[in-house]
Image (cartoon, rainbow, N blue to C red):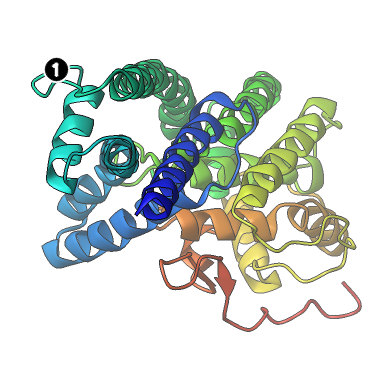
Amino acid sequence: MIVVRVLAVIAGLAVVQSVVRSAMRTVVVPQGEQVLLPRLVFLIDRSLYTRLSRRTGDPERSHRTFARFAPMSLLVLAGTWAALVIIGFTPIFWGITDLHLDGSLLLSGSSFTTLGFVPAPTNAAAIVAFVEALVGLGLIALLIAFLPTIYGHFSRREAEVVKLEVRAGSPPSVGEMVTRFNRIRQTAALTDTWADWEQWFVEVEESHTSQPSIALFRSQRSTSSWVTAAGAVLDTAGFRLSVIDAPWDPQAALTIRAGFLCLRRVAGFYNVPFDPDPAPNDPISVTRAEFDELLDSLALEGVPIRADREQAWRDWAGWRINYDEPLLALCAITQAPSAPWSSDRSGRFQPPTVRRLRLRRWQIDPVPNPPSW
């Protein structure tokens, strides 16, 4: 019997330390880590909210329903931590006292919540109760500090996304953004926009890799997403350098580099497969026909287009290949609303599920570019 109680104490300690390590790695560690427990909680909640959002039949209601997924998952995660700590201390109390399992469970719950409605029968049990109370208070303190940090990062991220709607429409697109700036004769003013978005990419990379759950928080508008906004900005910056007949803008190039590094590192947390050093002529998800169609529409709007469209395509595709796969994969993971040249073609990526913990690419590659391109 003594051996069984010792094993119970060891098992309880293993559960408690696993929960504490999970909370520390999720909240305290500055660089995001893939922790099994939070991931399972988010995947289970995701499957539930995906079903609920699809049953509404209305895009707006579906967006509002799925928007609750990430915040609710954080609360469920906190409750899961608390429940597992209580369960973990139950066999510890059972192993060091004469209490039955139900009495040990009540003592554990009393200690965790610091309510004290069940007194500790021995000095050893009282010491363990103090430890459990400290663990419970520590988890609550972590959660209190965690949520304001998340919403602070979320607010700063969304401010620039909302501003982009004025410049690029909703959902954002490269054609709309270029057309609007051309109409107000402010194509040169895009330099300031690139500087703002370079800073935005730097902040998003830092926040979304240190606190990965922020990536799953949806924008307030049903047609907006931080991922599709990033794609539209990067595509437009590529157009500014490759397509628009204007002097070279080094700030646009810096923004593209900051952007694809950001998307790659956020996507890397989700094990997204991508080539870290792609060739400029590797295939991309945007076809040459789509590219030429957009150029025709921009020319009709009076946008100065470079005469050599072949070179323009090669240059722009060379920029796009750096972030094409991470962009589409993140659109699938976040279930971003449909937007041109991003989430409208992200269906070849299947987001992780409880049964399949890794993102899977299931559709065949797009038709590769002709060799002459």
Viewer can see residue 304: no
Label 1 Cα neighbours within 10 Å, binned few <14 / some 14-19 / many ≥20? some
Q: Residue furthest left?
A: 117
| Residue 218, x across and y down, in percent | 36, 41
Q: Which is nearer the eye, 266 or 132?
A: 132
Q: Is residue 164 above or below residue 55?
A: above
| Residue 79, x across and y down, in percent | 26, 37
Q: Which is nearer the eye, 69 or 63?
A: 69
Q: Amino acid at mark 1?
A: Gly
Q: Is residue 163 above or below residue 331?
A: above
**In the rendered image, which quarter is residue 290 located in?**
bottom right
Q: Residue at x 59, y 34 (%)?
A: 182
**In the rendered image, which quarter is residue 181 located in?**
top right
Q: Which is nearer the eye, 168 or 352?
A: 352
Which quadrant would the N terminus be assigned to in this image?
A: bottom left
> Could you tell whether 289 is left or right of 184 in the image?
right
Viewer can see residue 119: yes
Which quadrant would the C terminus be assigned to in this image?
A: bottom right
Q: Residue at x 22, y 66 (%)?
A: 51
| Residue 61, x across and y down, in percent | 15, 51
Disc 1 marks which residue?
116
Q: Residue furthest front?
A: 1
Q: Residue at x 65, y 59 (%)?
A: 272
Q: Is residue 46 above or below residue 93?
A: below
